[in-house]
Amino acid sequence: MPQPNTPLIFHFTKQTNFCITCLLALTIVLGACNSEAQTDVGSSDPNFATEQEKLMTLERKWSDMYGEGDVEEIAELLANESVLLAPGEPPAVGYENVLALTRKLLAAEAAEGLSVSWEPEAVFVSSSGDMAYDYGLAKTKLADGTVIKGSYLVVWTKEKDTWKIAADIFN
């Protein structure tokens, strides 16, 4: 117990420092997304409601692809500079590294008899219409039928009028 007037000293591990850095970076990215723009009914360039629905559909499609182990289709959704932050794994940075980690996760889940799925809850599109994020609930069904619930956050970016996954983090 610290004595009165004694400063608290925090000792952070490399993993804690990395997590703090990721959270700060994510805060900056999310701060760039203006959630007020999506409620502007008169705004049609871009059409925010349409973009939100596209992203909800893409997110559901991605969950299905993952459940089927369809890495080739998942690859089509990735931005060139995508990032995947998965529990217990070092960050996968870049298209090829994200695909490699995705394959590793799918293989481990198949070997253990797990199935993973997720459902988006909300999408927020930036006022410029070229970035967005969504979040939702994830479920992992264990071989014995037990379901573990988690959450996820995905940052999307538009490349040549196509939404691509820029960053994915889940627990």
Image (cartoon, grey):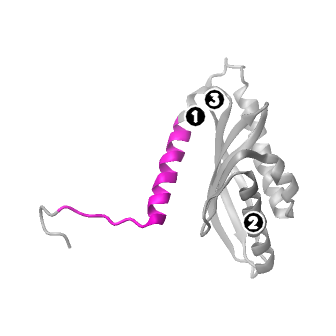
Amino acid at circle 1? Cys
Residue placed at 47% from the left, 48% from the top?
24
Q: Are marks 1 and 2 in contact (CB under 8 Å)?
A: no
Q: Does residue 51 lie above or below 64 as drawn?
A: above
Q: Nearer the viewer, residue 16 or 42?
A: 16
Amino acid at circle 3? Gln
Q: Position of residue 96 (x, y in %)?
A: 76, 55
Position of the N terminus by quadrant = bottom left
Residue placed at 72% from the left, 63% from the top?
101
| Distance between mark 1 and mark 2 Cα atoms | 28 Å
Q: Position of residue 60 (x, y in %)?
A: 78, 50
Q: Is residue 27 left or right of residue 13?
A: right
Residue sticking out furthest to the bottom: 144
| Distance between mark 1 and mark 3 Cα atoms | 10 Å
Q: How many marks?
A: 3
Q: Does residue 156 lie above or below 126 as drawn?
A: below
The numbered dot on residue 38 is 3
Residue at disc 2, secondary structure: strand
Disc 2 target residue: 116
Crowd band around label 1 with a 10 angstrom C-alpha radius: few (<14), some (14–19), many (20+)? many
Crowd band around label 2 with a 10 angstrom C-alpha radius: few (<14), some (14–19), many (20+)? some
Instruction: Locate residue 151: give its quadrant.
Output: bottom right
Ranked by sequence position, the earlier of labels 1 and 2 is: 1
Q: Position of residue 90 (x, y in %)?
A: 60, 64
Q: Which residues are magenta?
A: 7-31
Disc 1 target residue: 33
Residue at disc 1, secondary structure: loop
